[in-house]
Image (cartoon, grey):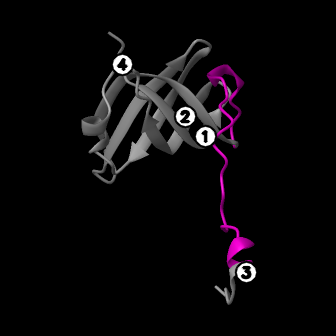
Amino acid sequence: MGLTNVYDLLHHFPFRYEDFRQVKKINNLQPGETASVKGKIELLANKRSLKKRMIITECFISDETGSVKAVWFGQPFIVKNLKNGDEVSVAGKIEGNLFDLYIKNPAYEKIKTEITH
C-alpha cells in the first residue's frame, strides 16, 4: 500500500468510501445512485431462484413517503436477523427504473428503540 510513516497513514483514504449519514426519503430515490434510507420492514421472505437455485431474500422497506424493495442474493440468514416490523437503516445501490426501484444487496443495521417505563 506504500504506507511508510504516520503521515501516509493519516492521508490514506479507502479506494471506495460511501458516506451513508445522509438519509434520503424513499420517494426521492433515483436509479443508479447509492443511498441510505430508514424505514420499517414489511413482507420479509426467502425465495429460491429458478435459474441458479440460489436463495434470494426480499423485503419492502417503508417510510412515510413510500416503500422500496431490498434484495439480497445468497444470504438466507437475513430472515433470522431481521423480522417484519423492525426499524432498519439500509444503504446500497438503487437499481431498476422510476416505477420499479430496488436496493441491491444493501448493508443494513437494525435501529434499536429505547423502552421507557
Q: Position of residue 79 (x, y in %)?
A: 28, 36
Tell me the CA gap for discs 4 and 2.
19 Å
Q: Secondary structure at mark 2?
A: strand
- C-beta proximity under 8 Å, tags 4 and 1: no
Above or below, comparing residue 84 to residue 54 in the picture: above
Q: Secondary structure at mark 3?
A: helix
Q: Position of residue 75 (x, y in %)?
A: 33, 48
N-term-proximal mark, 1 vs 3: 3
- C-beta proximity under 8 Å, tags 2 and 1: yes
Is residue 20 something that shows in the picture? yes
Magenta stretch: includes residue 9: yes
N-term-proximal mark, 2 vs 1: 1
Magenta stretch: includes residue 101: no
N-term-proximal mark, 3 vs 4: 3
Q: Secondary structure at mark 1?
A: strand
Q: In this picture, which residue range is highlighted in magenta? A: 7-32
Location of the C terminus by quadrant is top left
Residue annotated with mark 3? 8
Residue annotated with mark 1? 95
Q: Secondary structure at mark 4?
A: loop
- Kindly indicate the quadrant of the structure image that contains residue 36: top right
Q: Position of residue 92 (x, y in %)?
A: 57, 44
Tell me the CA gap for discs 3 and 2.
39 Å
Q: Amino acid at mark 1?
A: Glu
N-term-proximal mark, 4 vs 1: 4
Query: What's the mark number on residue 85?
Result: 4
